[in-house]
Amino acid sequence: FDENLKVKVCAIIGSDKGGKHLEKVLAEYPNIDTTNVTVEENSSVTLVMNAADTKQRTFFFVPEASDKFGMDYINWDTVDAKIFQLEYLLLMKKVDSPDEEYGTHGARILAEAKKRGMTTSIDVVSEQSDRAKNIVVTLQVKHGERYNDLMSLASVLDYNDDDTATVNYNF
């Protein structure tokens, strides 16, 4: 990890053993600013199972605190970054929830980051459903500058080939 790279983390972590461990690990890096980290409830947990024969990974996710994360947990006055990374679409209930003005709460967050001059980046999880079409591609912004969809709010998109085919988005 490049210790010269300044990183600001904005998240909710649990007040449990997992959250305390994460706090300890982040504290080892003086270049990581955790001012925007909220500690409450239980930590989100992801278990990864690797198939020995196919090497395919299967993820089991327990959302806990991640489901609550949203705009109200972001102190924009302290987020004066060049790049704003929003992770993980399709895994965070509030971020994926409908927003009357922006389509989703995640789109509202990205629009605010763009308004503040940040390059925006999103990471979308892989799953076998059509939710990505509804959350990532088909959402229209109804306010202010008109974006075609959530994709146009993200300067960078982390999406694998299978997922790109799923949403059938024309890159």
Image: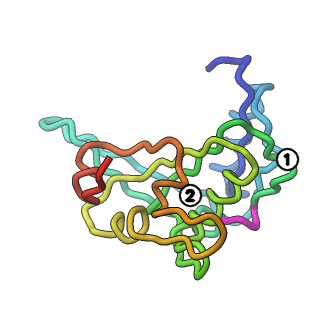
Decide which of 16, 110 is in the foreground and name it: 110
Mark 1: secondary structure: loop
Q: Pointers 1 and 2 in contact (CB under 8 A)?
A: no
- Of helix, strand and loop, which mostly describes the magenta segment? helix
Residue 89's x, y, as percent? 48, 58
Within the magenta stretch, is there residue 71? Answer: yes
Decide which of 153, 9 is in the foreground and name it: 153
Q: Is residue 99 above or below residue 156?
A: below
Magenta region: 69-73
Q: Amino acid at mark 2?
A: Ser
Using the numbered discs, state the Cα–Cα distance from disc 1 to disc 2 in whole angstroms.
24 Å
Residue 65's x, y, as percent? 63, 64
Q: Residue at x 12, y 36 (%)?
A: 53
Q: How many residues crowd mark 2 within 10 Å: few (<14), some (14–19), many (20+)?
A: some
Q: Amino acid at mark 1?
A: Thr
| Residue 78: numbered disc | 1
Mark 2: secondary structure: loop
Q: Is residue 1 above or below residue 33?
A: above
Q: Which residue is mark 2?
A: 44
Decide which of 142, 167 is in the foreground and name it: 142
| Residue placed furthest toward the right | 77
| Residue placed furthest toward the left | 53
Q: Earlier in the sequence, mark 1 or mark 2?
A: 2
Residue 150's x, y, as percent? 49, 61
Residue 119's x, y, as percent? 63, 41
Within the magenta stretch, is there residue 90? Answer: no
Q: Write down the quadrant of residue 42 in the picture.
A: bottom right
